[in-house]
Amino acid sequence: MTLKQLIYFLAVADTGRFVQAAADVRIAQPTLSRQVQALEDDLGETLFTRGRDHVTLTSAGETLLPLARRIVADVETARLEIAELANLRRGRLRLGATPSLCVSVVADVLAVFHDSYPGVSLQISEGGSQDLVADLEDGQLDLALVIHQPDRPTPGPAGSGAPRGRIGATGTGSALGLTPVLREELVAISATAGSTPLDEVLGDHAGIAEIARHPLVLNRPGYELREAVLSACAAAGVTPRIAVEGGEMDAVLRMVERGLGVAIVPSLVLAGRTGLHTTRLDGTGWTHRTIVLAHRTDVAPTRAAEAFRETLLAVLARTSRTGGLPPGVRFIHPSS
């Protein structure tokens, strides 16, 4: 039994004539007759009583009729739903992003994406780059906006002792696809003068050794930023004094505003934070970092993922042209 045979059976049942049914489904009448005969042979029952110029359903045909209608209708529904999915009237996007991006550009991009594709459900995971790469590798995300540091390995879970490889490669050895989108500057922040208990207020520029003399507020393990700060301190031969550790980005900013210490953060997160003093960092390499859109290359991207990538690049390009990116941030996609 095939779908075409059921369609031809319904055409004959609806018209009562083989010639008219063949014209309706746009095939030759002998072909339609052979297909209906093949269906009868497969079922072992005669479906029509043939008259000179008209046919009627047998009891077997009457039994098959509602079943055939439902099968054909279900197939049409499936086709329509898949077409809606392909045209992004429905679907799902699972996006991971670092906290600094979630509180800045991601919300703007998602607003544009949702306006264009309101039927696509959005699932957002916020976390450090290392955690997001692990989720991407495990198939829990479609895309991830992460920090790309090709010279710094991505360690495994705390205490596991197992490396996860680099952000450019998955644990199974198949590379992730990386699309560079932004280059951002890291800055030191402290509470504004008059509201900080620090012995010495940071100036406009400072090196990591000077910053490490102050108590530090650090993100929890799993954040690439935390590893960058600790690595810079180690390279400078200084031991940081950690005042508070373990917070998400919003918590770190608030703790610095309350004078608990200084922190090193991406310049992206400082929009509207008037209670913070910004200090540019002296040094090379670690003071700037690249944000990439990562995806697995061992599976085909979904239509929703492809549409989000296009929307992200378009929004960032427009924001860059109009001067809307924060100081210290620039759009770097190769096509720009």
Image (tube, rainbow, N blue to C red):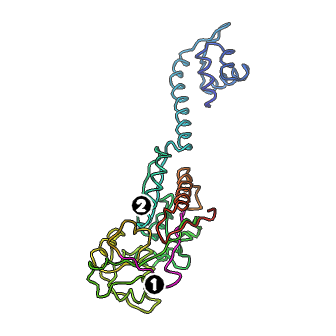
Q: Which of 240/67 is in front?
A: 240
Q: Which of 318/95 is in front?
A: 318
Q: Quarter-wise, where is residue 15 in the image?
A: top right
SS at mark 1? Answer: helix
Q: Which residue range is magenta in the image?
A: 277-294
Report the predominant secondary structure element of the magenta stretch: strand
Left or right: residue 51 versus residue 274 is right
Q: From the image, which quarter does the C terminus lie in?
A: bottom right
Give the x, y percent position of residue 309: 55, 56
Q: From the image, which quarter does the N terminus lie in?
A: top right
Assess whether residue 111 is covered by the magenta stretch: no
Give the x, y percent position of residue 333: 59, 64
SS at mark 2? Answer: strand
Q: CA distance from mark 1 to mark 2?
A: 26 Å
Badge 2 is on which residue?
125
Whether label 1 touches label 2, CB < 8 Å: no
Res. 231 mark: 1
Q: Residues within 10 Å of mark 2 (few under 14, many from 20)?
A: some
Residue found at the very far bottom of the displayed protein: 237
Does residue 326 sit above or below 60 in this rendering? Answer: below
Residue at the spot 39% in from the left edge and 77% down from the top edge: 278
Give the x, y percent position of residue 164: 50, 74
User: Mark 1 or mark 2, which has the lower sequence index?
Assistant: 2
Does residue 333 sit above or below 187 in this rendering? Answer: above
Residue at the spot 56% in from the left edge and 39% down from the top edge: 83
Q: Amino acid at mark 1?
A: Ser
Q: Amino acid at mark 2?
A: Ser
Assess whether residue 279 is covered by the magenta stretch: yes
Left or right: residue 301 versus residue 192 is right
